[in-house]
Image: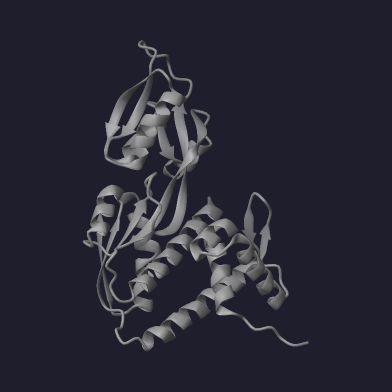
Amino acid sequence: MRRGKLDLNVLETFATVCLSGSLKSAAEHLYLTQSAVSMQIKRLEECVQQRLLERNNQSLRVTPAGEKMLAHARAMLRLESAALNEFLREPIAGEIRIGVPADYAPALLSSALPYLHDNFPAVVPSVECDLSRKLRRKIESNELDLAILTQDVDIDSGLPLWEEKLVWAEPVGSEKRADSYTAVGLLDVDCVLRDMTLRLAAQQAPFHRIAFRSNALYSITAAVENGFCAALLPQSSLSPSSLTSSKLKLTPVNDQLRIRLAIAPERKPGLDSIAEFLQTQLLLSARRAETTS
């Protein structure tokens, strides 16, 4: 029987599906239809005669064979990138300025930057921590090259990374306050989460007052976990014990924080390759975190 051949375009599609977690997200990222993505995955499975993905209307799971294929796909795509870079007239080199909110800096520092030198040895990264909206303004004015951002409601640009599930977290069993109002904690900085909190507080707690303000998310989380107030929080900010604690009532909300990697309008040579590399590393880290949580 004739052995099949691997197509790099199909491997890129497969890797994108694995990292994004759905055919729909992969299709949006690759500017393909969902049916075209599905056909490419089918072609790859027929080529290797293995089931690589288990999927239904609600979820998608990478099989053990799919995990092996993902490792091979990423290695082959890196090799292709390295081969092309070697023949570029302008090698990717110099300072790359990266912005990141403080809450996401650990993911960047642990999951992406340590591997950047191996793939782009002449690139020198510098990192700036700030609020997403401030970083977006710096991206738009080309003061930064790349930035990890929380997507605003009216903005849909950049490479997709991951989504943060949100919950309305409220202490239970506490004594009724004299004013009968629910105490609410507010991340009091110019950010998407603050806007969402002010909007959703009226739905979750019609009679409420802002009882705790902070410019640090960990302070809001600590106030909730210690029973002082309720708040809208990323589920990932709560400790594992709090997620299962009977002292907290956690109500999922429909809204999510969508995290993206924004790229400056004036792009340095090779910046797209670096952006795609960082996206892959961050998506892999997010996927690992999902499977271990």
- For the residue pair 279 and 240, the one nearer the viewer reads as 279
Residue depicted at x 21% and y 61% = 143
Vertical placement of 229 versus 53: above or below? above
Please provide percent x and percent y for residue 277.
41, 70
Query: In the rendered image, is residue 83 in sight?
Result: yes
Vertical placement of 56 versus 194: above or below? below
Vertical placement of 175 versus 193: above or below? above
Quarter of the image where one finds residue 114 = bottom left
Q: How many marks?
A: 0
- For the residue pair 161 and 31, the one nearer the viewer reads as 31
- For the residue pair 85 and 68, the one nearer the viewer reads as 85
Please provide percent x and percent y for residue 110.
37, 62
Please provide percent x and percent y for residue 201.
40, 27
For residue 135, side relative to residue 83 (left or right) = left
Query: In the rendered image, is residue 22 in sight?
Result: no
Please provide percent x and percent y for residue 46.
72, 74
